Amino acid sequence: METKSEILQGTLDLMVLQTLEAMGPLHGYGIARRIEQLSENAVVVNQGTIYLCLIRLVQRKWIKATWGTSENNRKAKFYTITKAGQKQLKAETEDWQRVSGVIGRLLQLTAGGKTS
Amino acid sequence: MSYLHRLIARIAAWFRRAELDRDLYEELQTHLSLLVEQNLRRGLSTEEAIREARLRMGNVVNLQEEHRNTRGLPFVDTLLQDLRYTFRILRRDIGFAFFAILIVGLGIGASAIVFSVLNTLLLRPLPFKDAESLVWIANLKSIPEQTTQVGHILDAREANQSFTELAAYYAYYNIGDRKLTGAGEPERLTAVPVSENFFRVLGVEPQAGRVFNADECRSGGPAAVILTDALWKRRFSSSPEIIGKTLQLNGEPVRVVGVMPASFDFTSVFAPGTRVDLFSPFPLTSRTDRMGNTISVVGRLKPGVTVESAQAEFDILGQRLTAEHLRNRNEFQPALSSLKAHVTGRLRPALLVLACAVAVVMLIVCANLSNLLLARNAVRQKEMAIRIALGAGRRRLIRQMLTESIVLSGAGAVAGVAIAVIGTRVLTQLEAFSIPLLANVQVDLGVLAFTLIIAVVTGLTFGVVPALQVPAVHVNEILKDTNRGSSGGRKHAWIRSSLVVTEIALACLLLVGTGLLIRSFLRVLDVDLGFQPEQLATLRIDPGPEYSTEARRNAYFDEALRLVQNTPGIEACGLTDVLPLEGDRSWGVAGVGQVYDREHHPSAFVRIVSNGYFKAMGIPLLAGRDFTEHDSASSEQVIIINDTLARRLWPDQNPIGQMVTQDGGRRVVGVVGGVRHVTVEQESGSEMYLPIRQTDDFSAVELVVRTSLPEATSGTTIRAALKPLDPNLGSKEFRSVKQLVDKATSPRRFVVMMLAGFSGFALVLAALGIYAVISYSVQQRTQEIGIRTALGASPGSLQARIILETLRLAAVGLGIGLCGSLILTRSLSSLLFGVKWHDPASFTGTVVVLVVVAVIAGYLPARRASQIDPINALRSN
């Protein structure tokens, strides 16, 4: 249970950073919606969880928040990625790609081993 | 880096938590409204849209809680919650809280006092610059003061490679050597003659003026003094104008060149329990060399040199110097030790005993509080069970319990610091105690840090056993059980009994140790000093500079003795140069015609005394006669020796009429008993007395008076009697010899007093522990007792049963405690005097005291049990 949420946490961080990098400033709802759309409703079960991730990223100074007005004219916090956040995103993206590359090759190897 | 950001942000967020909660709430509301709108757009009904939006958001209350934990400091939140709860609980039970805080406070206060003494005497460096490199250089060939001859030190200065500098002070200065006259009341001041570099070597600077210069430190140089801060304040109201002024000391003009700072306390390091007012220059020259072994030496090691390597160098140096100056100097066998070890080394074992004692006291405090908390827990079982039922985890409850005990010990620590501040202040005022550095004891940062650590450790120690009693599984039974807390009863009883047994055993340990030291102290007080200190007073009456010839001095002595002797209420009086326990010098001595090799040459302590001295002091004359006023320059040179010296020089012969080599031949006219000169504990050794009218080799004259007058008036009476001779006698110099003896035994008294205090406290705690356990067990068994009463058990037999139960606990505790004592008291041996470490009286005394205390502590609940009304007892369930 705990390990699963830990994995989820790291992935969610990466997804939020990537979303903000790609889309520019967004509020919590916007981020959640965007991730849902991209992952075809597979990742975020509970939209509230996004706020735990956001406060964590803000406290690490990877993103920053400013008050603004939402499309339905209510007060909302808009999140923007920072320089440090971009650096972190770059590093994590590279990590992720390397790991997924390795895993992918490993899985292929096993499959190949089975067939041969 | 990002983790550090996060920590700072978490702390900031914790302080802005109300604002951040509002922010989050608003964000979530916006989010929710956007979700609802989206759902409406999808064509859901309003009701459905809101329901679906809520589901998508998840549990908002949970989310807010998690948000707080993620962004803030959940640890602190829990702590605050626990603290609030603790304060509520303790307020509800204020009696318990007060009692617990009092016990912890006394324990921590005692620990903090002992630690501050230990810190000052053993842990902290001496109050000098780079005190670690200061070394005390004693001379083992000079008993008992370990002084060295000036020439050796001058040569060693040149020859040695270990020290940057060697400094010295003249060890035979006398209390009240310098008489200050002129403006104000005449007063006898004490001056320590020091070498030119003395202050430089110790690394102390004057707070005003300067130290002595080379000119002032040569023979016959201009007379100069440096004042101590205390004298400067007291006599000259800290006026800076005193520098350069001239004082009249012993009738001669002396220039004040400097004032030492208050932080430089010569006496607390070198001569504890005395007072020094002035420093004067002591020339290291051939003239002072001829005075013999006179100086105490302190050196500063070169960087990187150890005491051991310096000792190795001085071993060779001492032998060489002794061999080169066989004819013109005393022997020099240097023994080096760090100055710190020299100053406090003697007290080290006693201080360690005190530290152990206070640790034992703290253990008893912990056991006692554990017991109190257990009793409370038994009452709180239901509360705990309810909290568990409501979802509190066991860990959370244990944490809550430990928070409670740490709050108690923290509050106790605050009380303890207050006690320690008062206690250390009292200690610094104990001028009558000759314990080095005692005046420097204070509650400083080190002590506060120690107290903090002790408070936390204590809280955890006494809290852990009760906390682990938090029910794990029995929630249902406890909630169902109407008889409160009885499910854990048997187990509790066992834990609580063993805690009480521990307390008794530890108290037993302390009592045995204290008993041994008290009995040693009584033995010391019982020692036959060789003189009778009661009803004995003494006053400095040195003849002034106008009595320059021997004839004039002798006339002065005759007159002084006559005036005092003729005063009503005076039983006997006499003169001496040094009082017992106040200082010593020894000279070589032999019978005429006797030959000894250098190694075995006899030596004896020297006193210069007048007729009447032995009678006044109560020193028994064993054979021959006392001096008379006719033993003067014109008559035969005579001497009186003690029995030890008589046996040493002329074993199995009559010493009376024999000649000694002293001063070209003195005839022995009397033999007296030995006097404990060095310490109360140490045997007297060889002694000899020279008549004051036949020598000028004395630096002070003390009038000793045996009087039946009350202490308050004897001073004025004797001053009035001496008025015709010396109208300028100060009023403060009158001292009782009893005080002198008390001072000599004061380090021992100090330890005994502290230990007795600790033992008393331990005894009270043990009694409380016994009382609490027995009361609890009586309360638990109300029904059983009721049934017994109903079946015809008499109150007497009930009481006997309960007291017997108490005694069983005491017996187990005593058994363990006595075994422990037998093992541990052996290490007390070095502190004991006149008793053995297995002294039966101390052990029996401890057993009796503890049994009596146990019976009393058990009797109160026993009486209550016997008064239980059987009908009420049976109904009460």
Image: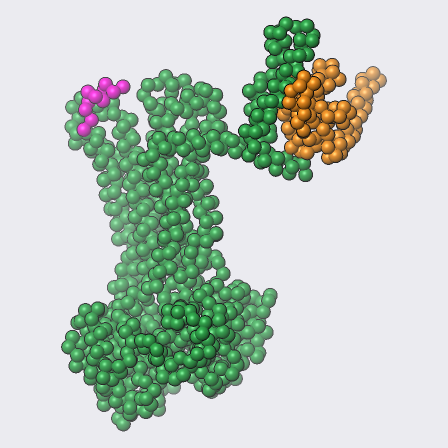
Chain colours: A orange, B green
Q: Quadrant of the C terminus of chain B?
A: top left
Residue toward you, B694 or B55: B55
Tell me if residue B372 comes above or below residue B251 in the rendering: above
**Residue A16 seen in the current view:** yes
Total residue callouts: 0
Say left or right for B210 vs A46.
left
Task: State the extent of the magenta-drawn residues as a range.
Answer: B867-877
Whole-percent x and y of residue B170?
Answer: 43, 77
Residue that appears at 29% across and 50% down = B843
The residue lying at 55 percent from left, 78 percent from top is B157
Q: In what quadrant of the picture does the N terminus of chain B appear?
A: top right
Q: What residue lies at 29% left-to-right and 37% top-to-bottom?
A: B770
Please determine whether, in this image, residue B324 is positioned above or below residue B202: below
Q: Is residue B564 above or below residue B445?
A: below
Q: Is residue A49 visible?
A: no
- Nearest the viewer among B144 and B658 is B144
Residue B762 in the magenta stretch? The answer is no
x and y, in percent, of residue B695 in the image: 32, 87
Within the image, what quadrant is residue B542 found in? bottom left
Residue B355: percent from the left, percent from the top? 41, 52
Res. B621 image quadrant:
bottom left
At a point 39% along the width and 84% down the height, the residue shown is: B252
Report the residue that reaches farthest toward the front: A73
Give the vertical position of B785 relative to B839 (above or below): above
